[in-house]
Image (spheres, helix red, strand yellow):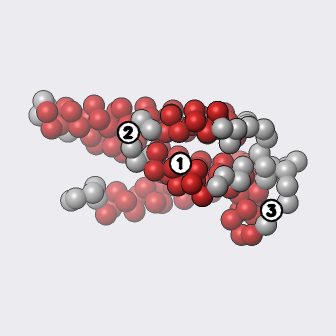
Amino acid sequence: MTPKRFFNFFAVAEAITWALLLIGMFLKYVTKTTEVGVRIGGGIHGFVFLCFVLAVILVGVSQRWGWKRFVMGLVSAIVPFATVPFELASARAGALDGDWGLGTEGREPRGPLEKLVAWALRSPWLALGVGLIVVVIIFVVLLTVGPPGS
């Protein structure tokens, strides 16, 4: 899977989960009919948000994004539906082109973060398992703490 397809998947998933959350909020706060949409949509959105942040880190480090693109990638997850325009702009700028910069055929990693990303790209199934565990742990901690403002 190319960085472009990988990032596109998470950018679109993040936008879809924003829609789920906003529909849930509409049902809870405007129509006052149910809280189920916020519970389900919010949970799914939170999980996909964390996955998108990991995708930004993985792609950004591997493809040597500058700090501005990195920050904009992270900020795009906070603004509803902004991940898709960010992904499109990054693709137009060539930031998602080519193969993985730290993949099997890529450059030698320098520094701890590049070494971690290179390991993840060279051992994708193990990295997927570890990444999923990390996201689940963060997700459970955040659920335990509670929603913002509670």
Give the secondary structure at mark 3.
loop
Q: CA distance from mark 1 to mark 2?
A: 13 Å
Amino acid under disc 1? Gly
- Asked whether 105 or 92 is in front, the reply is 92
Of the numbered discs 1 and 3, the one sitting upstream in the chain is 1
What residue do we see at 79% from left, 53% from top? 102
Of the numbered discs 3 and 2, the one sitting upstream in the chain is 2
Is residue 132 something that shows in the picture?
no
Residue 49 in picture, x, y percent from top left = 46, 47
Give the secondary structure at mark 1.
helix
Question: Which quarter of the rendering shows the N terminus?
Answer: top right
What residue do we see at 46% from left, 50% from top? 75
Answer left or right for 81 relative to 61: left
Is residue 118 something that shows in the picture?
yes
Amino acid under disc 2? Pro
Q: Residues within 10 Å of mark 2 (few under 14, many from 20)?
A: some
Q: Residues within 10 Å of mark 3 (few under 14, many from 20)?
A: some
- Asked whether 34 or 4 is in front, the reply is 4
- What residue did someone put label 2 on? 80
- What residue did someone put label 3 on? 109
Of the numbered discs 1 and 2, the one sitting upstream in the chain is 1
Residue 129 in picture, x, y percent from top left = 63, 52
Q: Residues within 10 Å of mark 1 (few under 14, many from 20)?
A: many
Q: Give me the disc on residue 73.
A: 1
Residue 143 in picture, x, y percent from top left = 34, 57
Amino acid under disc 3? Pro
Mark 1 or mark 3, whichever is nearer to me: 1
Question: Which quarter of the rendering shows the C terminus?
Answer: bottom left
Answer left or right for 57 relative to 17: right
Q: Give me the disc on residue 28.
A: none
